[in-house]
Image (cartoon, rainbow, N blue to C red):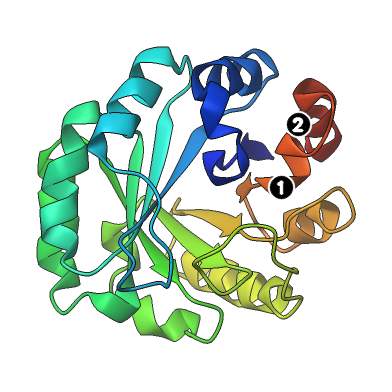
Amino acid sequence: MKIAPSILSADFGILNEEIKAICDGGCDFVHVDVMDGHFVPNHTIGPVVVKSVAKVATKPLDIHLMVQNNTFFVDLFAPFKPEYISFHIEEEKHPHRLIQKIRDYGIKPAIVLNPHTPPEAIEYLLEDLDMVLLMSVNPGFGGQKFISSIIEKSRKLKAMINAKGLKTLIEVDGGVNDKNVKDLEYAGVDIVVAGNYVFSNPSYKEAISSLK
C-alpha cells in the first residue's frame, strides 16, 4: 500500500516543515487538493503555494483538481511536474481530450469519481488512465467520515481493470485510517490518501507506517 498524505490537513503556518516531515516519514506521494470554491464549497491553494511545495517535497506530487474549467487548471499546475493530475468526471465534458493533454505534459492522467458515481461511468476511459481516484467522502473538506460502500465499489472497479488486462491503479481518498486500510487493500486499492489521520498524529512516521 502506498501512502499519499493530503496537505489539506497540514499546518499551513509551517507548511515547508510539514512537507519535509511527511517525506522523511516515509510517504510515497504528497497529495495536493486544489479546490476553486465552485465545484466544491471550499477554496484551498493556488500555484504560488504548490510551487513552494514542489521545491520542498522529496516525493512526487499527486494533484487532485476539484474545480470547474479543468483545462485551465491543468495548464496552471502542469509546470510543477506532478506524478499525477486527477480531475472529476462529473465536471468534464471532454475527458479523452483532457487525458491526452495531461499526458502530453509528461504527467500521468487520473480520473476521480465522487461517492455516488459508479465505476461504469469511466469503463470506456480505463485504457487511457494511469489511475482512478475513488472519493470515500464527499469532496470539499478534510476530516470527514469514511463511506464504507466504497469498499464494494473498489472491488467492482478492480474487476473491471483486471477484465481488461490493465494495470490502472486505484486510489482512495477520504476518512482513511488504520481501521479500514486493510479492507481497502483486500478490495484492490493501491494508494490511500490520508490527511487527518497522518497530520493529527504526533508522529507522522508512525502514522504512515501503521497504514503501510
Q: Amino acid at mark 2?
A: Ile
For residue 197, above or below residue 207: below
Is residue 51 in view from this perspective?
yes
For numbered disc 1, what is the local secondary structure?
helix
Front residue of 61/160: it is 61
109 left or right, relative to 149: left
Neighbor class of circle 2 (other Cα within 10 Å; few <14, some 14-19, many 20+) is: many
Q: Residue at x 64, y 55 (%)?
A: 189
In the rendered image, the quadrant that contains the C terminus is top right
116 left or right, relative to 123: right
Between the C-alphas of marks 1 and 2, the distance is 12 Å
User: What is the x, y in percent for residue 207?
Assistant: 81, 33
> Which image quadrant for residue 53?
top left
Q: Amino acid at mark 1?
A: Asn
188 left or right, relative to 200: left
For residue 2, above or below residue 131: above
Q: Residue at x 84, y 27 (%)?
A: 202
Front residue of 4/155: it is 4
Front residue of 122/24: it is 24
> Which image quadrant for residue 104?
top left
Please report whichever mark, 1 or 2, sits nearer to the chain's N-terminal start: 1
Q: Which mark is residue 196?
A: 1
> Which image quadrant for residue 201?
top right
User: What is the x, y in percent for residue 69?
Assistant: 15, 66
Q: Which residue corresponds to mark 2?
A: 208
The residue positioned farthest toward the front in the image shown = 13
In the rendered image, the quadrant that contains the N terminus is top right
Q: Residue at x 48, y 60 (%)?
A: 133
